[in-house]
Image (cartoon, rainbow, N blue to C red):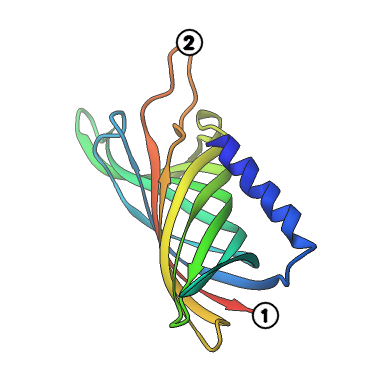
Amino acid sequence: MKKTLLLAIGITLATLSQAQVSFGVKGGLNLSGVQGKDAPGTSAMVGFHAGVQAGIPLKAKLPNGDLSLQPELFFSTEGAKMKVEGQGDGDQIIETTAKAHLNYIDLPVLLQYQHPSGFFVQSGPQLGYLLSAKLRAAGESTDIKDEFKKTNLSWVIGVGYAIAEGKIGFNLRYNFGFSKLGKAVDGEPAGKAYGRTLQAGAFYRL
């Protein structure tokens, strides 16, 4: 996975000086969650993403469309919700919802095929860097960043449609996390919990 990401970044840098690069801005909504053997009882939560992207045409031509490389850099709010129990008055046990807010800077490098009709598909690796992590429940916020790994590797698959000569478009993506989110503690391996994010967004190419 890491070798694939480094190869994609290397191709990006090698072609920047040889191709007519387009730039744009993008943003949209996230529906993120955590899945895995050690993440029972979690549910999805809504967030957002916003950032910039570049389009780098590749020399390879297909009979019915074009190939390009699309690196991006954006801020993304992710996480999950879970039910937790707390101490109420006396011996009373109360149940409340806790939300784990994970804020990332994400760098996907995607290979994109675009049909002349405007329809496109894209796929590639993504590297996420954790900026902050907080657990919020019952009106209180706790910093839990030290419990999570700083980086998160995932694979992206997506579809979309572009209009106005490709300047405006909409896309739907699924980010499938490969990295365990948590850290190993006291010699024990990290739990099997992985990030999953569905993104719906729009972009405008300058």
Number of disc labels: 2
Dots 2, 1 in contact, CB < 8 A: no
The C terminus, quarter of image:
bottom right
Q: Nearer the viewer, residue 60 or 6?
A: 60
Nearer the observer: mark 2 or 1; the answer is 1
- Disc 2 residue type? Gly
Please tell me whether residue 206 is drawn above or below residue 108 in the rendered image: below
Q: How busy is the neighbourhood of tag 2: few (under 14 within 10 Å), some, or many (20 plus)?
A: few
Badge 2 marks a residue whose secondary structure is loop
Q: Earlier in the sequence, mark 2 or mark 1?
A: 2
Q: Which mark is residue 101?
A: none
Residue under label 1:
206
Residue sitting farthest toward the bottom: 164
Please tell me whether residue 55 is drawn above or below residue 37 in the rendered image: below
Residue under label 2:
187
- Disc 1 residue type? Leu
Q: Nearer the viewer, residue 53 or 76?
A: 53
The spot of residue 14 in percent (x, y) is: 75, 54
